[in-house]
Image (cartoon, rainbow, N blue to C red):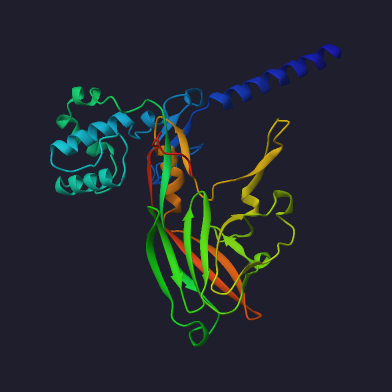
Amino acid sequence: MKKERYFSLYILFIALIVIVYSRSYAEVYRYVDENGVWHFSNVPIPGSKYELFSPKNKIQDVSTSLGTPTIKEVLAAQIALESLGYNPGKLDGICGKKTQEALERYQKDKGLKVTGRLDKQTKLRLKPVTNEKDVEKKPNIPLSTTYIAEYDISLESVERPDKPKKRYGDTKIDRIQESGESMYQFEDEMLKISWRVGPKGIAFALINKTNYSIRIIWDEAAFVDENELSHRVMHSGVKYIDRNNPQPPTVVVRKGKITDVIAPTDYVNWENFRSIRVSGHWEKLPLLPTSENGDSPYVLESKVRPYIGKTIQILLPLKIEDVVNDYLFTFRINNVDVTPKDSSRSDE
């Protein structure tokens, strides 16, 4: 009786090993979506380009196995495009805006599908033009570097209280340059406010044009992210421990000016230090993807591409003459460029 029981347990154990082994090494389907992001599936995906793939081979170079161009391949294409008169911009191995535009012009002229990407057909057409020695001569292309995302974000619209013209006058939105940086400025009869919105934070300068004090009601202010989710905000001067407590209003005296920085409270973390003198400080998480380490920019490109065309909003309640006026500022992400980080430029 005992022998039969042990034999049954032995058979069950062997069966479990076989199941685990077969699942670990079973072939699955690997495919790339329209944004260049790769996925795995147990079944073929209709309408997609897929290939059989074994999990034991996952250590393969993804960009090579899936046809995503490497830095060397992009550099070769840039050299070829330049020699043919299609200006690809800087020869850096990065498929930036100018390179994409050059690819589009070349694809159009050659009757290829116009994608602006270095796809298989375009690569094959350009290959005979490329001199491998020219590619090898480029010494400034690092094997591994940090890539950063540079966002083009504009102030699209500003919503104010109903029937505002009688009291607040007409509005004006301008793009201005200040200290070498591009900013957006909104103005009406009550105030003038300049915004600098980027992936790492939100800063503004507000001028009170009235003869009355303006109060910023922080407890009613909000940041609305690209998925239309609303977040409570904090501003400079607020302690990390007080981020979820009531915040007193900021007073802008008549004809006065203030500058401030806004951060969603759930985008702020406390960074501890093991030091006798310094206990720690609060650190802002980026509002949008900002950088990626590696030998290919395509990982970061796949992260930032879905943000293009989306909007973020800032609700700023302003109390003027005992009346709270909700100003809703809408910013649109027009484009994102992925470029190698300039080592001479400090992180902002």
Which residue is farthest top? 3
In the current view of this chain or complex, which residue is farthest to the bottom?
166
Q: Quadrant of residue 9?
A: top right
Please identify the quarter of the rendering in which residue 146 is found: top left
Residue 97 visible? The answer is yes
Is 210 displayed left or right of 266 in the figure?
A: left
Horizontal relation, residue 320 to residue 13: left or right: left
Q: Residue at x 17, y 26 (%)?
A: 131
Residue 21's place in the image compared with 249, above or below, is: above
- Residue at image position (15%, 30%) is 128
Q: Is residue 77 above or below residue 348?
A: above
Quadrant holding the N terminus = top right
Residue 309 location in percent, x, y? 42, 58
Q: Foreground residue, 325 or 331?
A: 325
Residue sitting at 51 percent across and 62 percent down? 205
Q: Is residue 347 above or below residue 245?
A: above
Q: Is residue 158 left or right of residue 285?
A: left
| 239, 5: nearer the viewer | 239
Q: Is residue 107 above or below residue 341?
A: below
Rendered location of residue 262, percent (x, y): 58, 57
Give left or right: position of 75 versus 237: left
Residue 112 visible from this viewpoint = no
Q: Position of residue 60 (x, y in %)?
A: 43, 24
State the count of labels: 0
**From this viewpoint, which residue is outermost toward the left?**
84
Residue at 26% across / 32% down in the picture? 75
Q: Position of residue 180 (x, y in %)?
A: 37, 52
